[in-house]
Image (spheres, rainbow, N blue to C red):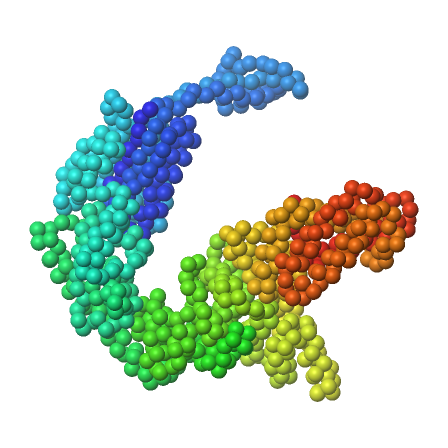
Amino acid sequence: MPDLLIELFSEEIPARMQARAREDLQKRVTDGLVEAGLTYAAARAFSTPRRLVLALEGLSERSPTLLEERKGPRVDAPEKALEGFLRATGLTREQLGVRDDKKGQIYYAEIVKEGRPAAEIVGEVLEDVIRTFPWPKSMRWGAGSLRWVRPLHSILCLLSREDGAEVVPMVVDGIHAGDTTSGHRFMAPDAIRVTGFEDYAAKLKRAHVLIDPEERADHIWHDATNAAFAQGLEVVEDKGLLAEVAGLVEWPVVLMGAIGEDFLDLPPEVLQTSMKEHQKFFSVRDPKSGRIVKFVTVANRETADHGATILAGNQKVLSARLSDAKFFWENDLRVAKSGMALWLQKLDSVTFHNQLGTQAQRIERIVKLSRAIAPLVGADPDAAAEAAEVAKADLASEMVYEFPELQGIMGRYYARAAGLAPEIAEAAEMHYKPLGPSDALPAHPVSIAVSLADKLDTLAGFWAIDEKPTGSKDPFALRRAALGIIRTVLGNDLRIGLERLINTQLLEHAIALNLDSAEEQEAYFVQHLVDDIAHHGVFGAAFRAVTDRLDGEMAKPFRIEEGTWLAHLRETLPGKSHDLLGFFHDRLKVYLRDEGLRHDVIDACLAMKGADDLTLLVKRARALSEVLATEDGGNLVQGFKRANNILIQAEEKDGVEYRFGADAKYAEDATETALFAALDAADAVIAPAMEAEDFAAAMSAMAALRGPIDAFFDAVQVNTDNPVVRRNRLNLLHRIRETCMQVADLTRVEG
């Protein structure tokens, strides 16, 4: 069986596109070959800045010959039907067969599809892949119609066997497939003839080309860390930058250079970001001081002066870049030391979203919400409000304007320069976190309060204007915001009722969206409504409380007239609140999936009181999951569902609810008496355990019911002929349901 080697050789492919291009090449070629009837044993894809490579092992010699049978029209069908069938199959009437069918005799055709050699199929598939390749951006050149990421120079396509190699015949826009490639652009540009993948990889390596991006990345990291270690330094790890740089060179040569003395006092994050974004340099840190003191650059060639000229040029460009960064830093420090008032004023004219106002208006809402959250997380309300007020001031700084990814980090430096308390400076950076699954969580109470307020305001705002994530689209990173809140709450073991905070912030946005056009009476109503939301936590109670108060104060009923924005608010905001809380629950299910908590277990706990307290919810779900993993717990669910189903059917049939009156004196069987005793014992444990939030104890008591319930169903018939006994047993089933439902809604547990 032959091996297949494909190389598409072009001008430089952007590093950011190479990984996806490797995947697309492998998938599209292999899918096409398999669809055409070929099989293969293994496939590997590689890339360099100038080439995409695919190597397949154990490819079939040819596709199999297939016999396809097609059912035709009935023998007595109109002539035109038969003619159409003959055209479709390419056969004559004499070549058709006749067989009996349930509707009579029919024609049928046997069509033989001859197998084809692998070379023919490979040529067709590869040409189609090249012409339809899904580059994010592509170009045309010359007079041809082909589009490629950069001009395509050559195609190498070989089928290799033990007795030699065969060039697959194909032509794409005048480019004929061959068995030659080229080495390094500068160090070995001559043509190289190859006979297979191993020969190809070995000859290219001798021609100063490493085709495997992982090998290039390992080589860069090894040489860089060794060079740093030799000087008592360490390279700042950056996997994204490493992958990008490995995609910029075919023959990596690591060079280490020094940073000018004038720039060493810049914050290390500024040096690292400037060198990474502008020059693709790695930062080299002194582990004793934490300062960035040198850089590593990766050249694409070896030189006679061992890279001295390259380093000199890089240092010259770097000096210009860092001069800009130093200028921004010094200007920003002057503003910060004056109290950051200038930046806060600038944010008045910076739009956050065209429907949600400016950054300054957003900060006002976050300040107010931070003050409300602070007592819930153990923070001082004044400190939380002060931190929220300055946390986003650095958005107006020159440094963050140049490097947006430094938002928060620079805020911490500027808050320190302004003489603010350490916890306030920390909140400037940490309120953005966590940004990813491995990112640190805010841990100080002030940072937690501002972080939660920031994310909750963002979510409530976009829910208020119906800009929710749809499918895979989430342009405002709302899923990340919700997951950040979940991780912060659970990671810090916080007990917070989200519903009240969601309601308050939804109302704040509704006011901002509508109050400019409100009448004086409406404004008065809303002012009190916000206060009552904070007290009651839910819209219905707050509306009723405010309306009752206004009845007394204004001596006439306050009616929310149909068609007004207040009427619309009363009708829509509760639904938005429910939907946003459900969004949190959906994100929580995804987050807990890796922990092994099933969705149905979480659903069973969501039906219980306090579902907006995420810490309580997860604690309950974990306890239920542990119980269900036991034999007693799993079988209890079956007994519970059996009891519930019998009860539902009886209530529907009889038109009554069996909720009261279960009495042990009507028990006729010992198992019935034992079940009464077991339920009494379980109730004595479950109620106080639930009150104390000892879910493990409560669910253990519930699981202990498994034996008595199983014995009861094995021994007695619930729907007995004796109406008194039947009613008593149905009421007993209600007790089973009621006892178990104290812990979780077991009707939602699957299986």
* Residue 122 shows in the view: yes
Residue sitting at x 79%, y 51%: 675
- Toward the left, the furthest residue is 304
Q: Relative to 533, say whether 632 is above or below.
A: above
Q: Relative to 663, say whether 325 is above or below.
A: below
Q: Quadrant of the N terminus?
A: top left
In this picture, residue 259 sits left or right of residue 343: left
Q: Quadrant of the C terminus?
A: top right
Q: Quadrant of residue 122?
A: top left
Q: Nearer the viewer, residue 276 or 469?
A: 276
Residue sitting at x 35%, y 50%: 136
In this picture, residue 123 sits left or right of residue 64: left
Q: How many discs appear? A: 0
Residue sitting at x 82%, y 49%: 672
Q: Nearer the viewer, residue 345 or 660?
A: 660
In this picture, residue 364 sits left or right of residue 538: left
Q: Position of residue 666 (x, y in %)?
A: 88, 52
Q: Position of residue 500 (x, y in %)?
A: 60, 71
Q: Position of residue 717 (x, y in %)?
A: 83, 43
Q: Quadrant of residue 610?
A: bottom right
* Residue 583 shows in the view: no
Residue sitting at x 81%, y 42%: 715
Q: Quadrant of residue 104?
A: top right
Q: Nearer the viewer, residue 110 or 390?
A: 390
Q: Position of residue 403 (x, y in %)?
A: 31, 67
